[in-house]
Amino acid sequence: MSAQGLQSGILGLMSREEREQPRQAGAGSLKLRTGVGIVALFALAALLAPLLSPYAPDSQDLLHTLTGPSAQHLLGTDVVGRDVLSRVIYATRTDLPVAAAAVLIPATAGSLIGLVAGYFGRLTDTALMRTADLILAFPVYVLVLALIAVIGPGVGAIILAASVVDWVIYARLVRSEVLRVKSLDYITAARASGLPHRRILFRHVLPNVIHQPVIYMMSDMVLLILALSSLSFLGIGVSSPTAEWGRMIAEAEPFLRLHPWLILPPGLAIVTVGIGFALIADALADRYRT
Amino acid sequence: MSRFGFVGKRLLQTVPLLVVMLFVVYALVRVAPGDPAQTLLGLHATPARVAHLDKELGVDKPLLKGYLSYAWGALHGDLGNSVKAQQPVATIISNRLGVSVWLLAGAMLLSLLGAIPLALLAALRQGRSADHGIRMVSVLGLTIPTFWLGLVLVSFFALPTGLFPVSGFGQGVVGHLHSIFLPALTLAIGIAPIQIRALRLSLIGVLDSDFIATVRAMGLRERRVLMRHVLPNAVSASLTLLAAQLGVILFGEVIVENTFALPGIGQAMVQAIIQRDYPVVQGLTLAAALLVVGMNLLADVLQVALDPRVELR
């Protein structure tokens, strides 16, 4: 795919025209606060899952299955009588860390590669850009699926497959920023004063380019949470007794006709946390790109 | 450079890409941990069967030789045989391609039908509440998981009303259209937000441009300005974008086919992954890669053919 166009289309990353539109005062910080608030709530839920959950996520109650919402079970119970609310809360402990790992690993690796390639240029740079073009010429998600097939379904495969593909985006993003910063006077001055490359890179270049990968990481979290839950729904991600939102929806699927409410809590959890990250991405993009 | 030369150059550029793509697809089975044949057949398989399957998968040969014979086969439409289904991979693809193409075409059509008017409305009402509303909805659309949206449509619309089938592909053209509608709508809602966002921007650019100011100054009615001069630009921009989105759309196809039990290529892909049917995974990956490369090529060529202002590089 022509990655740049698409990526800028996805969440947050705005083009020049969009940026230059007049903003209402304060809208940016409201967006940021709402986004951070939502994400913080989910992070808190993950940390405090044992305290917040009324039941253990895997404790079955075969006498009270598929009960629907009640005072004992606020969001009802599933087919083996597990408390849906507790499972939705516990799922934050699967979805968030796995998605975060699948974002952080390629973001770190890709940013470092982009930093080095952009700064030193020449052969490193050419090799990087050709590799990037090749990976992006593939339908990225199909490549992820193929890698999962080879490695075998599971969390590790998803993180690895996402890393193999996703670093390219960060590398390109950071590289183009480094090319811009490199030609600025203060870098020339730092070079002229004989500072070692390593110090220039990490003390002078990195701080001025790092906002780009950070903004994209927020959008990437949305994409990875969606990918993780989709793959788990398809049966090639997180496997069954583990509480995971996509898996919960798959487990509820056979009962759609009589108990359609079962698919709502995990789905709404995915959408809500996604909106949280999307708002952060949007607000940061507004702030840094004017 | 002449237009003809440009197309030729673009075609030539894809040749090395295809060579490497074929290699990546072939290498998939070589990087699989352990002996793929042993993994497929289980620990109790006889050595003779394992050796036979090794041969079938082409992993008994040296890397380069194995690659060349895989590539040679692929060029002749031979993608090997499914290990589980005892069927050539090419047959699986051709049997299932129809369903996937119906779904893809339906979803693209529905997404354009939704995105173009909404983007136009947002661009015309730029900065006002309609614009803000449309942009909010499109951000929301990006955070909704496709499979969940499909199930919500099934359980709160299709099942209670009984208006649409919730699985299968139906009989005849009418049956196909009937059963493809909800899946295509689900997929389209996943595609449309990015379309709306990008189109809105390009439409704002078009509406501000000198040639629109000129035709307006010539006293053309607003309706005619939109239909004759603004809209064609929008359609051509969204077609290019659709080609660029194709990789993501194909993942959506995989999800939607499995959500609605449509017997297409995406369903075969997930089955093959679960069963570790490597030849099928390889064949389908290759088919998807070819489709994406082909569509992007087509989009480039169409753009050159349709828009004389495009710079040839």
Image (cartoon, coloured by chain):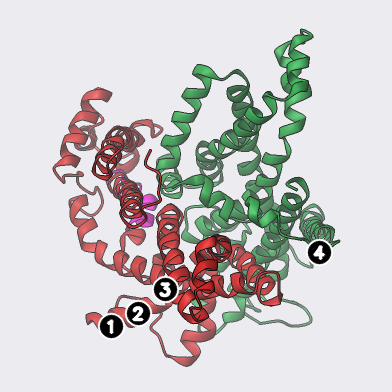
Locate the N terminus of chain B and report the quarter of the image it occupies: top left
**Mark 3 Cα-neighbour bin, 10 Å: few <14, some 14–19, many ≥20:** few
Instruction: Find residue B263 and report its horizontal and vertical position in percent.
Output: 31, 67
Residue B272 within the segment the image draws in magenta: yes
Kind of residue at disc 3 = Arg
Instruction: Find residue A123 and report its horizontal and vertical position in percent.
Output: 49, 17
The disc at residue A24 is 4
Chain in green (letter):
A
Kind of residue at disc 1 = Gly
Is label 2 or label 3 in front? Answer: 3
Task: Provide the chain ID for the residue under circle 2.
Answer: B
The Cα atoms of the two marked residues, 4 and 2, are separated by: 45 Å
Residue farthest toward the left in the current orientation of the protein: B76
Asked whether the beta carbons under mark 3 and mark 1 sit within 8 Å of each other, the answer is: no
Instruction: Find residue B86 and report its horizontal and vertical position in percent.
Output: 19, 52
Task: From the image, tell me which residue sits under label 2.
Answer: B179
**Mark 4 Cα-neighbour bin, 10 Å: few <14, some 14–19, many ≥20:** few
Asked whether the beta carbons under mark 1 and mark 2 sit within 8 Å of each other, the answer is: yes
In the rendered view, would you say A193 is above or below B11?
A: above
Kind of residue at disc 4 = Gln
Same subunit, tags 2 and 3: yes
Is label 4 or label 3 in front? Answer: 3
Q: Which residues are magenta?
A: B268-280
Kind of residue at disc 2 = Ser
Residue A26 within the segment the image draws in magenta: no
Is label 4 or label 1 in front? Answer: 4
Task: Provide the chain ID for the residue under circle 1.
Answer: B
Locate the C terminus of chain B and report the quarter of the image it occupies: top left
The Cα atoms of the two marked residues, 3 and 1, are separated by: 36 Å
